[in-house]
Image: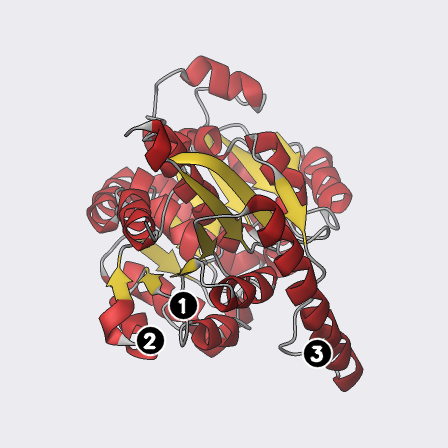
Amino acid sequence: MQQESLVKVIIAGGGTGGHLFPGIATAEELRDRGAARDIVFVGTEHGLEARVVPREGYPLRFVRAEGLVGKSFAKKARALFLFLLSLYDSRRILSSVRPDIVIGVGGYASAGMLLAAHLKGISTLVLEQNSVPGLTNRFLGKFVDAVAVTYQESMDFFPKDKTYLTGNPIRRHILKKEPGKDSDQSYALFHLEKNLFTVFISGGSLGARSINTAMVEALHYLLDLRHTIQFLHQTGEKDHEKVMEAYRRLGFKGMVVPFIYQMAEAYSLADLVVCRAGASTLAELTAVGKPAVLIPYPYAAANHQEFNARKLEDMGAARVILDRDLNGETLSTTIRTLYADQRARKEMQRASSAFGRGDAAERVADIALSLVKT
């Protein structure tokens, strides 16, 4: 691609890893194929992007925005006021960056930027990671130039003539990290032992109180395995100290951290993953083919996490525990069963790999470049 054809891109949105990481995967694809001259992320100061994007080496600009759904009347009024401010912030950023395309990855930080870009005649693309789209993306889908969806079921929520089934973009280092490759460095990174069965536990980028609580309870049922099993547990900030103390007190080996940046290494070492069923998490799990115990977030829009988790369970790639049924006994029983049954884990791994889709970032990048106005 010649220099004059390089494009300027804004990737807007975030808040959580489920929105942010597909945006980073798309940015990596555009950068690595030499298609983009500048890639600028736009989010909020209190979203996950404020921590992660600078580490990834991309410029980050901020807009003033907050969520609207599930809030009190006063907080909804504040969110609407901030939305107007986000339009002002977005127009200012657009005038400064002068992008050829704006890609929205979901979350409330994307709405003002995509609307402002549309009003200025700039090409727009929105990514929808979930099977049931949220209100923001349903609204944005009415006027953006294209929508890239992860699941066939979500196509019905958007205009068919501009909606594409792409899958959910996955960060390149996760796709490239192979089990066993550079394993010594990966084990050393998390201070884990190579000869122990490893369970990776994550409630998402912000942590999950119910998973953390159930895991602390589960340790009491797994005491007889503490010399043959170890844990890598991402807790979120709030529960970190309490959970870490429980592992220490009961004598279990492992690493307990608030947040993990090196997810490729974490997945590569895991014999079993215990996690929520967000779209980005499932995309990563199936791309690397890991057996999983899925605990869907019970308050997700239209219960889409349970819907997604059941699809993997039906294919034999995962076991599902509903949040209302989650406790130390149910979680420990499931972990113990899969620990003891290597054959079941192998079957789950094969089913997971068959479901995985590693070319989503390429598809999204192709659509984005096709929308750029020449």
For residue 71, the mark is: 3
Q: Amino acid at mark 2?
A: Phe
Secondary-structure class at tag 3: loop
Disc 3 residue type (three-letter): Lys
Q: Is residue 292 or residue 308 the one in the foreground?
A: 308
Residues at badges 2 and 3 in contact (C-beta under 8 Å)? Answer: no
Q: Nearer the viewer, mark 2 or mark 1?
A: 1
Q: Earlier in the sequence, mark 3 or mark 1?
A: 3
Q: Position of residue 207 (x, y in %)?
A: 63, 51
Where residue 178 sits, quadrant-wise, is: top left
Which residue is label 1 attached to?
144
Crowding at mark 3 (Cα within 10 Å: few <14, some 14-19, many 20+): few
Q: Quadrant of the N terminus?
A: top left
What number is the disc on residue 158?
Answer: 2
Position of 227 relative to 23 (above/below): above
Q: Residue at x 72, y 43 (%)?
A: 240
> If you read the primary sequence from the N terminus, does the residue marked by circle 2 or circle 3 appear first?
3
